[in-house]
Image (tube, rainbow, N blue to C red):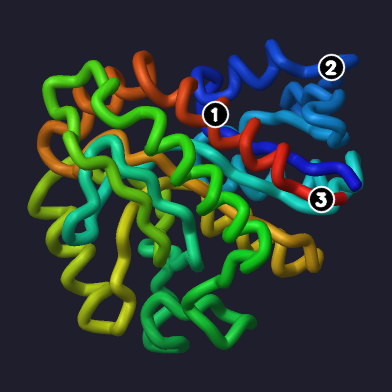
Amino acid sequence: MTTAILSALPEEQSGLVASLQQPQRRVHAGRTFWTGSLHGHGVVLALSGIGKVAAATTATALIERFGVARIVFTGVAGGVGDGVRVGDVVVAQDYVQHDMDASPLFPRWELPGYARARLACDAALSALLLDAARACVASAQGQLDLETANPALQVHHGLMASGDRFVSAAHESDRLRTLLREAGHEVLAVEMEGAAVAQVCLDYGVPFAAVRTISDRADDAAHGDFALFVQTVASRYADHMVQTFLQKLRN
């Protein structure tokens, strides 16, 4: 069984590519895919591209062209939930598309044709990711080289939101969180790809799980925090969590 590891940015996956055994590089649909093995598991490594359409295309290619049995997404996100701070890790329990609005034909955030707003992640894969994330956070305590370093890193498990917008203003983040909360969606973090991959995986019946490290608070400082975090922390987190996840994974 082949496992796909998706990331949004090259910095988040460079260490995994370097560790790949028997690597082979393949290009399909304008994307680069690395096949090989890690910890005895067949894997395909790929960059999703930024945004929901790019991520959906990549996920579809992984399933149709490479026949992957599961997809795991690792990357960064903006923290919007109470107590979700820079350096924390969020493992997705489910996803909502925060920019989906087909009202008045359908309730806001509901996915037309799916009769739901939230897409669940695979429970077994998510449990393994939670274990891997906790191990990563435990090893990283006190080692973040950021002015905004979080002295008490935490792992969270819950709802993530995706949309084709980099949320980078405090008023926008607050409004988004409030609107979702009023509809019963207590969101922890926001990013730009995961919900699209979750939808593709639902369509194909492929298990999906996602983990995101909080790079910023999706506020007015998000742009600077994001760039610094990706350069200094994201690749180390992703490498550690994926390697640990694969060591725990059974075929």
The disc at residue 250 is 3
Q: Nearer the viewer, residue 188 or 38?
A: 38
Image position, residue 125 (x, y; %):
66, 57
Q: Please say if 90 is above or below 62.
A: below
Dot 3, how many residues are within 10 Å of its Cα: few (below 14), some (14-19), or many (20+)? few
Residue beneath disc 2: 21
Q: How many marks?
A: 3
For marks 3 and 2, give the CA distance.
18 Å
Dot 1, how many residues are within 10 Å of its Cα: few (below 14), some (14-19), or many (20+)? some
Q: Is residue 213 left or right of residue 235?
A: left
Q: Secondary structure at mark 1?
A: helix
Identify residue type, mark 3: Arg
Q: Secondary structure at mark 2?
A: strand
Identified at 16% across, 54% down, the residue is 172
For marks 1 and 3, give the CA distance.
18 Å
Which image quarter: residue 209?
bottom right
Q: Please say if 114 is above or below 175.
A: below
Q: Nearer the viewer, residue 60 or 251?
A: 251
Which image quarter: residue 159?
bottom left
Identify residue type, mark 2: Gln
Image position, residue 196 (x, y; %):
57, 56
Image position, residue 133 (x, y; %):
48, 44
Residue beneath disc 1: 240
